Amino acid sequence: MDEHLERLWQSANKIHMPIAFTKSKIMAEVKKTLEVLNVKRAYIRIIITRGEGEITLDPQAASQNNLVIITKELSENPKWWYKDGVEIIIADTKRTSVDSMDPSVKSGNYLNNILAYNEAVKEGAFDAVMLNHDGHVTEGTTSNIWIVKDQILVTPPLKAGLLGGITRAKIIELCKSENIQIEQRNITAQELQDADESFLTSQTRRIVPVVKVNKTPLGSGKPGKLTLDILNKYNKLI
Ligand SMILES: Cc1ncc(COP(=O)(O)O)c(C=O)c1O
């Protein structure tokens, strides 16, 4: 929760949106909502709006923040993801650039991601990965992406234009403590297609092995060894 709220605060700051609530107030409201939902594993969406007011683009017209908390039961990930892996595509839709709509801001504006996801749906793929305007890999539509090449784990750097995933940060920490070699560097579309292994990460899905990119199988065509090793270690940590 600390990391999530910190990212929420940083995101609000980047879009010049003051937040009238305290983090402890939001924590308390989330707790109350979860008590009512009463499930073992829950999805939680915390939304802060600028508030109500005249219809205009001018944020000054908004009165005061509204807080919306949406929760629902979250089922366990399907077993086939780990047995067979999933297929992704590289979308034609490019990720918005850092100097237009900064992808490091976690906002409700998912239109860019939705357009890319639609491409994946049309191809029967699980998800789409978006490139930036320099042709480098950024992220999935609701996840961060990783590749393994010659035993080295690689993920794009934040400056490629992506959301700083909390799962991503945890895996970087985990790899450091487990002496797993990791690089944060630009990845080209070709490198992604030539990877030995790949996986996606997010808080709701944790780690999802990728076995095909644009219909081309990666490595053995099955979830990779290092991917499954990191998955095991991550699950233990959580
Ligand atoms: C665009 C995008 N990238 C990455 C992520 C993964 O972030 P996290 O690990 O914090 O769930 C998400 C999660 O919603 C996302 O929407």
Image (cartoon, rainbow, N blue to C red):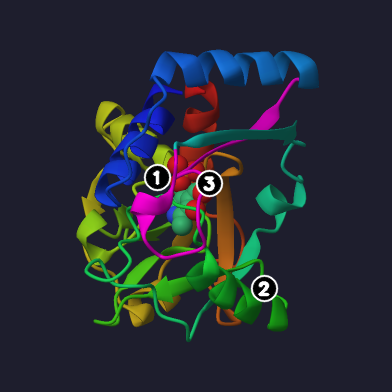
Decide whether residue 40 is among the magenta residues.
yes
Residue for point 27% across, 26% down: 177
Q: Which residue is mark 2?
A: 125
Say which label, 1 or 3, has the lower sequence index.
3
The residue type indicated by label 2 comes to Ala
Residue for point 46% across, 39% down: 230
Say which label, 2 or 3, has the lower sequence index.
3
Q: Secondary structure at mark 1?
A: loop
Q: Which residue is mark 3?
A: 52
Queried on whether the Cβ of the residue with tag 3 lies below 8 angstroms from ligand 1, the answer reads no
Decide whether residue 61 is among the magenta residues.
yes
Q: Secondary structure at mark 3?
A: loop
Q: Mark 1: few, some, or many residues within 10 Å (few <14, many ≥20)? A: many
Queried on whether the Cβ of the residue with tag 1 lies below 8 angstroms from ligand 1, the answer reads yes
Q: Which residue is mark 1?
A: 165
Residue 171 in the image: state x and y as whole percent: 38, 37
